[in-house]
Amino acid sequence: MVRSRGRPSLGRQRIEIRPIENGGRRQVTFSKRRHGLFKKASELSTLCGASVAVVAFSTAGNVFAFGEPTVDAVLRRFDPLHPVAADDGAALAPAPAGGGDAAPPGDDKELDVLRRAADQTKEQVTAEQARMRDVGDKITQAMAAAGKRFWWEADVEALGEAELPEFARALERLRDSVRRHADALLSTAALPQPPQQQQQEEVPELDVSDYSF
Amino acid sequence: MVRSRGRPSLGRQRIEIRPIENGGRRQVTFSKRRHGLFKKASELSTLCGASVAVVAFSTAGNVFAFGEPTVDAVLRRFDPLHPVAADDGAALAPAPAGGGDAAPPGDDKELDVLRRAADQTKEQVTAEQARMRDVGDKITQAMAAAGKRFWWEADVEALGEAELPEFARALERLRDSVRRHADALLSTAALPQPPQQQQQEEVPELDVSDYSF
DNA sequence: GTAACTATCTATAAGGT
DNA sequence: TACCTTATAGATAGTTA
């Protein structure tokens, strides 16, 4: 590009830190500085091993967020209502309604139980995969058709009325499966044998009527 | 301050973005960059009228936060599980305890309230997308690492304790979303393909208490 | 944890494609 | 919208107090 005369540009100019009136300029600045801010946050995290979360709302109401390791992880750790140390999710562990609520740490049986729970979960997940592969193809198609990259971007509207309930049910089952696994992981410290309910592979009754399909 | 010989310092040097081993150096860097990050966030907010929140945990476990107008305000606005009006909720606040309890039908205020509620809903949906995108990247990584093609094949075991609850929650939210859509479909028996999806996002609010996590 | 001090390095304001 | 380019304002590494 030929710059016929004088300086090719004025270069960076100093600006006062005060509200930008011009809408277009404000939008451009927001975009640039937001990127810069997230980058800084990322660098801080990497350099110093810090957990960082950034949330920004534009004047237009759009949200942008950055988090390491995850926005939610950091925010929950920050939330005083969910006091959690380095390992978050302690708040997620349901207080077992059974008898004692704390087991002596260091017991070998603990490990064994954990192992079984893990295997069980894995089994369930495998079963889920089999059941889901079918409906999954439909969903994948919907994703591809819309040029989406992530599963949650799947165009729900494009799913037929036949696939929808199946999709929802599949989600629910997987959700439950994952939750059980998470609970098992998180209750490593205190494993008070629950009243032998969750142990069986029987998936908790699915009350479909609840979801009026 | 006398500097007896040579250059007083080498000046700023370029550094690679990777974990700083030296504890002292890391601490100094954390302090400096944290200040810089907060300043950037502040400027972004002032220049662009954006609401911004930043939360950072040092490796020592200390928390530092910045927020405009307030950390809590931004985080509540971001958390869809705790719907709070962005601006002091004047619009959604319970009817003033004065005389009448409802605005006369046909009043412009009615429309205004509706409009604000709609905006809020839209905002929440957008926030969802932002959070999903974040945790989604993590899950996608897990998928890629395992060479899986579908999201439900993601190796649950490979997800960290931080990601697991996220994954479960993401599933839950998506499930709810799907259910709402299904409900809408069924209640309007024969509605042809909606022209847009963002427009009629007005759906019943979700009752999370049902799926307590 | 903070606060200088400097010499660099980086982010970015403007303007263009 | 995003991506260039330029030239400069601002951030900061290394060090000491």
Image: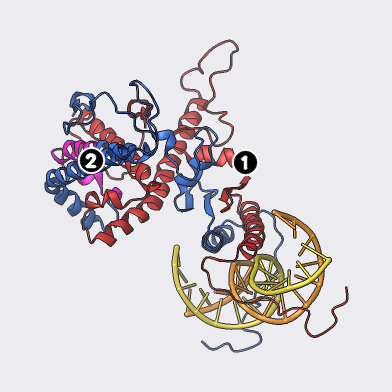
Chain colours: A blue, B red, C orange, D yellow
Q: Chain of mark 1?
A: B
Numbered badge on residue B70: 1
Amino acid type of the residue tagged 2 in the rendering: Arg
Q: A186 or A19, which lies in front?
A: A186
Kindly report which numbered mark, 1 or 2, lies closer to the viewer in this rendering: 2
Q: Which residues are magenta?
A: A152-173
Q: Is residue B21 magenta?
A: no
Amino acid type of the residue tagged 1 in the rendering: Thr
Residue at which label 2 appears: A116
**Based on the displayed image, in which of its 4 quarters is residue A72 positioned?**
top left
In the structure shown, which secondary structural element does the residue marked by tag 1 occupy? loop
Name the residue: 38% across, 52% down: B133
Q: Is residue B22 visible?
A: yes
- Furthest-top residue in view? B99
Graded by Cα atoms within 10 Å as few (under 14), some (14 to 19) or many (20 or more), the crowding at tag 2 reads few
Q: CA distance from mark 1 to mark 2?
A: 46 Å
Q: A33 or B28, which lies in front?
A: B28
Name the residue: 40% across, 28% down: A102
Name the residue: 65% across, 63% down: B24
Give the percent coordinates (x, y) of residue B8: 78, 79
Vertical relation: A17 (above or below) A168: below
Q: Is residue B182 left or right of residue C4?
A: left
- Furthest-front residue in view? A107
In the structure shown, which secondary structural element does the residue marked by tag 2 occupy? helix
Give the percent coordinates (x, y) of residue B81: 43, 34
Q: Chain of mark 2?
A: A
Give the percent coordinates (x, y) of residue A210: 23, 24
